[in-house]
Image (cartoon, helix red, strand yellow):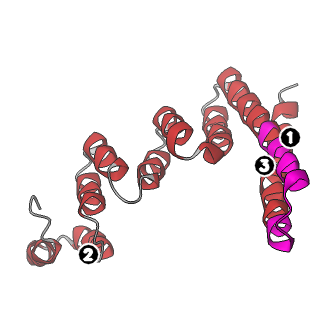
C-alpha cells in the first residue's frame, strides 16, 4: 500500500479473503490525485491525522472535513470548517448540538445550538444584503432563494431546539 498500487492491493486482499477491504479499495481505485488517494489509504488504516494532512494537500481539501464529520470529531470538524468551508460551521454546530443532546450534555448542546443560530442569522443577513446589491438577473436570485430556504430551514429547526430548553 505504500506505493499506492491499488490494483495489486485488491488482488492481495481478495486472496486472503478480506471482502470489506476489497470493496473499499474498489471505491478508490479510480482516484487520480495521489494525495487524495493516499489520504483514503490512510483512512482505511485508521491513520486519521495522516489522512487529514493528505486530504488538505489534495485537490479536494473538503474531504478532510467530511472525514471528521463522519468520525464525529466535532471539534476538529469545526476548526476545519472555519478555514476551508465557513458556510458549513452552522450545520456542524447544529449536528454537534444534536450529539451532545443525545448524550445528555444539555448545557453544551444549548451552547452549540445558540452558536448555530447566531451563525445562521448572520448568513441570512449576508444573503439578504447580496440579493439587494446583486444585479445579475434571475440565476442569482434563484440561487439566493435556494440558500435562504436551506439556511432558513436549519434556522427554524435550530430555534425549535433552542426553545425546547426553556
Labelled disc at residue 26: none
Circle 1/circle 2 CB separation < 8 Å: no
Camera-side residue of 34 and 101: 34
User: Sequence-wise, which precedes: disc 2 or disc 3?
Assistant: 2
Say what secondary structure mark 3 lies in.
Answer: helix
Q: Where is residue 54 in the image (x, y as percent from the top left)?
A: 28, 50
Instruction: Tell me the residue at 68%/30% (across/down).
Output: 112
Looking at the image, residue 55 sits to the left or right of residue 149; the answer is left
Queried whether the magenta region covers residue 141, the answer comes back as yes
Q: How crowded is mark 1: few (under 14 residues within 10 Å), some or many (20 or more)?
A: few
Camera-side residue of 11 and 2: 2
Tell me the quarter of the picture where residue 135 sits.
bottom right
Tell me the quarter of the picture where residue 143 sits.
bottom right
User: Sequence-wise, which precedes: disc 3 or disc 1?
Assistant: 3
In the rendered structure, which segment of residues is drawn in magenta?
122-142
In the displayed structure, would residue 159 be above or below residue 23? above
> Which residue in the protein does label 1 denote?
160
Amino acid at each position: 500500500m505504500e506505493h499506492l498500487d491499488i490494483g495489486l492491493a485488491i488482488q492481495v486482499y481478495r486472496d486472503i479473503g478480506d471482502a470489506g477491504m476489497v470493496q473499499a479499495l474498489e471505491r478508490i481505485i479510480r482516484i487520480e490525485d495521489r494525495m487524495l488517494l493516499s489520504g483514503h489509504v490512510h483512512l482505511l488504516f485508521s491513520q486519521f491525522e495522516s489522512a487529514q494532512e493528505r486530504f488538505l494537500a489534495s485537490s479536494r481539501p473538503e474531504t478532510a472535513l467530511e472525514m471528521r464529520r463522519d468520525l464525529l470529531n466535532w471539534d476538529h470538524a469545526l476548526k476545519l470548517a472555519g478555514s476551508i468551508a465557513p458556510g458549513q460551521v452552522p450545520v456542524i454546530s447544529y449536528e454537534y448540538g444534536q450529539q451532545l443532546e443525545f448524550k445528555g450534555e444539555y448545557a453544551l448542546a444549548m451552547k452549540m445550538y445558540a452558536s448555530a443560530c447566531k451563525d445562521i442569522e448572520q448568513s441570512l443577513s449576508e444573503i439578504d444584503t447580496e440579493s439587494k446589491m446583486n444585479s445579475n438577473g434571475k440565476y442569482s436570485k434563484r440561487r439566493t432563494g435556494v440558500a435562504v430556504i436551506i439556511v432558513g430551514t436549519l434556522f427554524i429547526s435550530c430555534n425549535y431546539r433552542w426553545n425546547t430548553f426553556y
